[in-house]
Image (tube, rainbow, N blue to C red):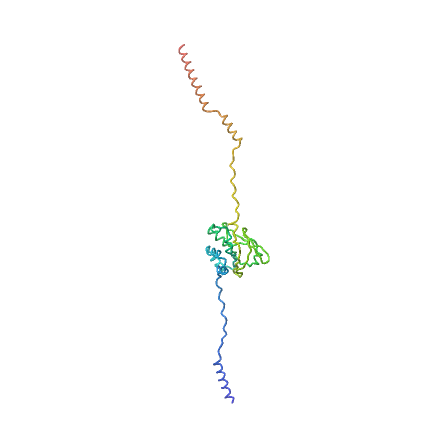
Amino acid sequence: MAALILPTLTAAFSFLLLFTPHTQAQTAPAPGPAGPLNFTGILDKNGQYTTFIRLLIQTQVASQITNQLNSSTEGLTVFAPTDNAFTSLKAGTLNNLTTQQQVDLVLYHVLPKYYTLASLLTVSNPVRTQATGQDGGAYGLNFTGSGNQVNVSSGVVETPINNALRQQFPLAVYQVDKVLLPNDLFGTKAPASAPPPAKTPSSGSSNETATKAASSPDNSDAGSIKSNAGFMGLVFGMMGLLFIGIFS
């Protein structure tokens, strides 16, 4: 009896294995490396930054930011002026800038480090930007405020930071309603000093010169007198010789 049960159980077990679906545990694929951040895409998605985007592309600062985001361990912070901010500028402000000055203006809106809004309240002012002057010194920004309100000042303009378009390392992008104008480019320049007045001759010096001229003898008159005296002496000498010859 046992000899019949064992083969029967074996056959039944094999039958079950044949029709039972085989399931294999599948592990989820590892996430691929994150793609490069599309900085201008962030601005374009939020709208009202067309002028700033145009300047970023025109000055090639957009490409510079992308390269830095892929290589920097410090991250970046960008302040994005709205289209209304550029409209509020004095007419001709951008057109009157040289190509290098436009680059400096755009780079003045970029900090070479990632900052949250809270960390901007504890920084040591001024905070250097990506823009540099002709002497190689970096242009700086000053940050003040309290609580959730942060203000940024260039020395020419001051404006609150109103909106965080992105606040995730390695890139923070904040909206500002004024264009940040560097003091080195737009600040009031001191007037050039006037040249010193020309020196005028003193009255004493003039009188002294006049006195010397008046007291100096006329050389030509003196020479004439001496010449006449010599001629008269010669005449009297010849007359004397003549008389001596007559009476001798």
Q: Quadrant of the C terminus?
A: top left
* Above or below, comparing residue 106 to residue 17 in the picture: above
- Measured as percent of width and height from the top left, residue 169 is found at 53, 61
- The percent position of residue 194, horizontal first and vertical second, equals 52, 41
Residue 225 found in image quarter: top left
Q: In the rendered view, tell whether residue 8 sits above or below residue 86.
A: below
Q: Looking at the image, which residue sits at the far right?
A: 147
Count how many numbered circles sit on residues in the image: 0
Q: In this view of the protein, which residue sits in the foreground, 17 or 246?
A: 17
Residue furthest top as drawn: 247
Q: Position of residue 72 (x, y in %)?
A: 50, 59
Relative height, residue 15 to residue 116 (above, below): below
Q: Nearer the viewer, residue 71 or 243?
A: 71
Residue 22: % across, % down: 48, 77
Nearer to us in this view, 225 or 180:
180
